[in-house]
């Protein structure tokens, strides 16, 4: 099946097939549904509704051996895209024994075995440096293979092309680690794409209170790397921009910085009414809701019929319900999960 | 007199000092129109406006550094680090800058600033790890951890008026939990003075923050077992009021120390070591410390409850020293 | 006396008189002489030879109530320009009782009473945030005067126009505090000028190993503030750029970032032979030595006769010698200076 | 066997592990062509090249964060923070990231990394402040502080092979001071094991780093006064080897603890408190701690010498416990 023939879609690389487009839609719908489920399960959940295009678009199309260092808001869909089990994620949000962290870590952590970095504490910004280290590790593998004692680098060896996508918030872009990490990534031309999931708020603060520039991408020039600003509610635009940057990273040409401009449709946490912001602003962004928008687009370009999409949404709802059931029935994390003797790793 | 919660008492102290002293201003995240994390700055922005209640970016190191700079110029900044878990991000500004300046300039400069931060278990369970024992190790800093609304207001007032960098640890579990009679007029609780929260004869429990309340509950419960337990609330972590602890131990001959943070290397170690140095002859039993086990603080409520020291941990420790 | 009539000089604002030019020369000569004296006194001194134009040019022409937060390399001349006593500074470098810190702080600290921030530990980068706080304090005074309870702001009140100059190294520009501080300064339009004393090295590392861009000024755009790159060995260019930025700061228009490109003629510390860098590079920079260069310029434009300058240099040498004598004769810091009970300030 | 200095022994350990294990690489400032601060990486760049010996910008937080990320991917990074005084800049990466990951991922991930850093007084007097006691408070980290070339090599080797984050504190005073017989072949000194550096009957001095040498000198001097002093070199700060201290105290009944960093809240507090809890019955005297007074560490040599604990401070403390 070839790429869908629309100017916007053909810009994407690698080309997206109609199946990809449907899958993107399904993932966005799943993200929406699971985020509101989590917000109901846990009143302190940090819901990502409205940011699905940025989140899904950034991480779609990666290789299984790539690594994602996700922002704390909305990482569950990323864990799922990388191979996690939904019931175990809900279990995590609920502090159940089946959660990947067995109740130990913050609710929004996931399984590290599927190529994501773990969320263990909430110190925003440090993840940008940890992600840097993952990219450094990929770079290192490449250098090692280049060394006289290793087989010559043929450019096709998969280890030569692993890449990292690190997403982070617009508020987080002001932590010192942003600067230190981007600088080192630039210096060493590390294979990493930094994507700002720019939802215009940090808790109650509007971004003009902490960002003196219109786009975080303006900071790329300070490191001599490409910067791009994209409509973060247009999943194809996001996917296109990130994939171009990933391709660049795979080619060994270094990091990129992308500002994906989106909006947090709900409050900072589930129970936050977000009454600190003008209703008109929220309303205008609800009109740009990435889900119905992509839906319209899919129908327009003939990639899907409307009832197709209804069916997909129903599937997603059923999947979420089933997983929720499993998670709810699972026992709370208990004495066996506490693991006071599992703080230090043992030498294997 | 008004009946205030712990956080209301803290905010009242800040508001009163801001009215009294135009040099006092606040730096922090979401302290403006939102009214602060966990209502920790409620009403201050409305009363004092943008210039004196500054919402900052997520830049903990520069926030604390900025407070140092403003304090050097004679201001009295109060910088809020939303949670004690983020103090490590600003540690260099605190321990190499704020703490050193007065001594290192041979007294020519001083740094009258307050760092307020939330610590401990709390209703939302977020950001439970804190490193308050670190601060007690560093010369040039003061640090307090009130356990009651009354002390919260009095210690915050004293902290703002102090010419040194003072870290005020605010316990999240206590934030909205209890109400206390708090005087309407200003008062200070002196930094560096512990208080005997409950008198007793048979054993002393020295505690901090939330554990003071658990120690008091344990002491009450132990009367049923015929034990008279004295509870000392440290209130200040730096400087520590060792004389008050010594006096209590000389009376009871038995010492338990209880805090919520990790037992190993915690503030209890310093209290215990001070007694082992200054009053070992008064002891009729080992000094028993109660604190968190040596593991990261787990997130799930069910694990957190298993993990944290509770009333029963304190009762057990008291029984152990009493029966020795 | 009017401004000297050279296109380069008339560009400076406020205009420099011939007396200013001679004073600039004297200060550069004094900086050179005292730096080599310190390097002889203390083998671990970090000498600033070669960077005099940047250092002196950045801080000349400030008001007494402005504040300088100096880089750790070469701050003594700044302390002198602000009113310090040279013998006490040498005493500081030698750990003598007459040193401003009485032997307590690092050798390169100075008196805070003359409008400089103190060096107390060597944690590079934190000074950029401390300087930010000084500027915040100036901004705050201005806001307070604007408040309904204060006299109206008339734009002439001196407190409204105080400014901060913060100098720092090119290596230091990669610490997180650089990012956090510049961002906040930009947001709040604080009256501060950040000057990178860019000497192309951080200890043994050449700047291409830690700076992926040609000029630190490229980072200004990321905060929406003006950035400028100047020849850091041309004292008039430095002075001009910094003064323009200071004027802007005084007008309440916010911070600026200036990269003054210069060269560390000696090693990182006095005993460092700096053999990690190509001799040809050092030689080419010796040809651009700011001192003889300014000397030639002064003679060229007729601001001074050559023997004038010789006399100035002799004066400087005598001044340094006299101060050195006093410092050497002073007692080492002793028990009375230790001040173990002076760690905490007492409430006055 | 070769006679190596302390720093040569450290570099030898790193070089041997880099030869043995291609996953090991170094991040740090000036570790490339310069050969490291105070020759701390001499010869490594020449042997292993740019890819394995990476000169970094001045970015301590990201350096440590990068090591965490690389370790997550199975590498064995050694990140060098030039001086312990700068650890506060990377503290969040250390205590909230590196330390927590293994536990918080329920064992799915681990972080085998080494942070090496220079501490203490030294020939150049620079950057004397260190916060090693902080690290012992934090679960999930290990920390060592060798006192001899032999231990330096063995502990560094053990640190590199350890699957956890290990902080290796390297004492600047010892760097070039003494030479020791150090085996040519690999060996480990197990992390978490103290050693009796000198046997004695009348009192135990537990010491770390440079103070081990001062304690040994003090012990020698005290023989003239008829005292037989045992010296225990802690070697590891986390985990602490309390059983070895208990065994020694059960033998001597008298305990002095000596370290260079501040006495208040230092590692000595934890050692003392552990003994006050586990072996108070064995004590015939108070536990006396010797450490720096509670002030920032002064810079001038003349003040530094007045400030730091010395052989005489240790002798005095031993006399005090002996005469009690
Ligand atoms: C270092 C640090 N400071 C403060 C916080 C408290 N905090 C939690 S979420 C948040 C806002 C983050 O904003 P942004 O990065 O834009 O992410 P968003 O919530 O908008 O997705 C803040 C300040 C934190 N978690 N970490
Ligand atoms: C945070 C920190 N990291 C490392 C050091 C060690 N150090 C001292 S000077 C120096 C180089 C500084 O380079 P730069 O900022 O360019 O200043 P220069 O020495 O060139 O004047 C380094 C890395 C330090 N003092 N502080
Ligand atoms: Mg945001
Ligand atoms: Mg430099």
Image (cartoon, coloured by chain):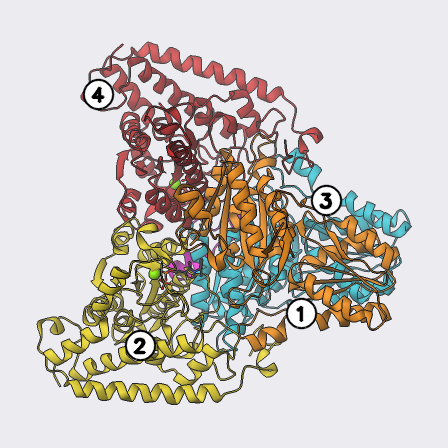
Chain colours: A red, B cyan, C yellow, D orange
For the view shown, which residue lies furthest in the front direction?
A: D1
In the figure, is residue B18 to the left or right of C54?
right
Please report contact status of discs 4 and 1: CB closer than 8 Å, yes or no: no
Quadrant containing ligand 4 reads: bottom left
Q: CA distance from mark 3 to mark 4?
A: 60 Å
Q: Is residue D139 left or right of residue A259?
A: right
**Answer yes or no: do the residues labelled 1 and 3 have beta carbons within 8 Å?**
no
Residues indicated by labels 2 and 4 sit on the same polypeptide chain = no
Which numbered mark, 3 or 2, is in the foreground of this view?
A: 2
Looking at the figure, which quarter contains the C terminus of chain A? top right
- Name the residue nearer the viewer: D21 or C74: D21
Q: Residue at x 27, y 88 (%)?
A: C314
Q: CA distance from mark 1 to mark 3?
A: 37 Å
How far apart in space, not on screen, are marks 3 and 2 (Cα)? 63 Å
Which residue carries the number 3 mark? B309
Q: Is residue D211 visible?
A: yes
Please state the horizontal and vertical placement of residue D54, each as a whole percent of the image.
Answer: 42, 46
Query: What range of the chain is rendered magenta?
Result: B34-54
Mark 4 crowd level (few <14, some 14–19, many ≥20, 10 Å Cα): some
* Badges 3 and 2, same chain: no
Q: Vertical placement of A210 versus A84: above or below?
A: below
Residue that badge 1 annotates: D309
- Look at mark 4 in the image and give the residue it sits on: A10
**Is label 3 on the same chain as label 4?**
no
Q: For marks 1 and 3, give the one nearer the viewer.
A: 1
Q: Chain of mark 1?
A: D
Q: Are marks 2 and 1 on the same chain?
A: no
Measure the C-alpha gap from mark 4 to mark 1: 73 Å
In the displayed structure, D3 sits above or below D218; it is: above
């Amino acid at each position: 099946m070839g790429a869908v023939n629309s100017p916007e879609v053909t810009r994407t690389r690698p080309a997206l097939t109609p199946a990809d487009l449907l899958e993107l839609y399904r993932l966005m719908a799943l993200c929406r549904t699971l985020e509101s489920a989590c917000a109901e399960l846990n009143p302190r959940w940090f819901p990502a509704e409205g940011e699905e295009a940025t989140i899904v678009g950034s991480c779609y199309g990666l290789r299984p051996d790539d690594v994602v260092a996700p922002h704390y808001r909305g990482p569950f869909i990323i864990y799922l895209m990388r191979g996690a089990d939904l019931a175990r994620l809900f279990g995590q949000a609920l502090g159940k024994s089946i959660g990947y962290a067995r109740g130990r870590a913050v609710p929004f952590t996931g399984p590290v075995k599927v190529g994501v970095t773990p969320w263990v504490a909430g110190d925003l910004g440090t993840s940008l440096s940890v992600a840097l280290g993952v990219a450094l590790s990929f770079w290192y593998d490449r250098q090692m293979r280049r060394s006289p004692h290793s087989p010559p680098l043929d450019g096709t060896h998969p280890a030569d092309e692993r890449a990292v996508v690190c997403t982070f918030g617009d508020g987080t872009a002001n932590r010192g680690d942003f600067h230190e990490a981007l600088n080192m990534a630039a210096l060493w031309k590390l294979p990493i794409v930094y994507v700002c999931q720019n939802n215009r708020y940090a808790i109650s603060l509007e971004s003009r209170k902490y960002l003196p520039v219109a786009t975080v991408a303006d900071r790329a020039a300070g490191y001599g790397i490409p910067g791009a600003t994209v409509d973060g509610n247009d999943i194809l635009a996001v996917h296109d921009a990130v994939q171009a940057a990933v391709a660049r990273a795979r080619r060994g040409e270094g990091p990129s910085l992308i500002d994906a401009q989106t909006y947090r449709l709900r409050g900072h946490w589930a129970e936050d009414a977000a009454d600190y912001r003008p209703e008109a602003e929220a309303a205008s962004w609800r009109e740009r809701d990435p889900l119905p928008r992509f839906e319209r687009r899919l129908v327009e370009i003939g990639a899907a019929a409307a009832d197709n999409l209804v069916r997909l949404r129903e599937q997603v709802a059923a999947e979420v319900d089933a997983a929720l059931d499993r998670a709810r029935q699972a026992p709370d994390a208990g004495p066996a999960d506490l693991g006071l003797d599992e703080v230090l790793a043992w030498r294997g | 007199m008004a009946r205030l919660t712990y956080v209301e008492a803290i905010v009242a102290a800040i508001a009163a000092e801001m009215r009294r002293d135009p040099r006092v201003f606040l730096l922090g995240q979401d302290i403006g129109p939102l009214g602060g994390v966990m209502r920790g700055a409620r009403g201050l922005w409305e009363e004092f406006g943008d210039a004196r209640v500054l919402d900052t970016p997520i830049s903990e190191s520069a926030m604390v550094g900025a407070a140092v700079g403003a304090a050097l110029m004679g201001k009295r900044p109060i910088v809020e680090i939303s949670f004690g878990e983020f103090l490590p991000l600003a540690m260099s500004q605190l321990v190499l800058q704020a703490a050193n300046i007065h001594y290192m300039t041979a007294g020519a400069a001083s740094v009258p600033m307050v760092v307020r931060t939330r610590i401990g278990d709390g209703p939302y369970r977020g950001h439970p790890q804190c490193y308050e024992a670190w601060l007690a190790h560093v010369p040039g800093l003061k640090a307090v951890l009130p356990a009651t609304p009354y002390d919260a207001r009095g210690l915050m007032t004293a902290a703002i008026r102090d010419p040194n960098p003072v870290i005020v640890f605010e316990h999240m579990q206590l934030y909205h939990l209890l109400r206390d009679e708090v005087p309407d007029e200003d008062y200070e609780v002196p930094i560096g003075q512990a208080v005997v929260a409950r008198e007793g004869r048979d054993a002393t429990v020295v505690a901090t923050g939330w554990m003071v309340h658990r120690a008091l509950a344990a002491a009450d419960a132990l009367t049923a077992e015929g034990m008279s337990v004295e509870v000392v609330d440290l209130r200040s972590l730096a400087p520590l009021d060792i004389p008050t602890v010594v006096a209590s131990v000389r009376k009871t001959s038995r010492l338990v120390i209880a805090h919520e943070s990790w037992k190993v290397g915690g503030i209890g170690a310093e209290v215990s070591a001070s007694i082992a140095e200054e009053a070992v002859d008064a002891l009729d039993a080992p000094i028993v410390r109660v604190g968190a086990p040596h593991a990261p603080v787990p997130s799930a409520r069910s694990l957190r409850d298993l993990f944290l020291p509770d009333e029963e941990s304190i009762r057990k420790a008291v029984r152990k020293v009493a029966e020795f």
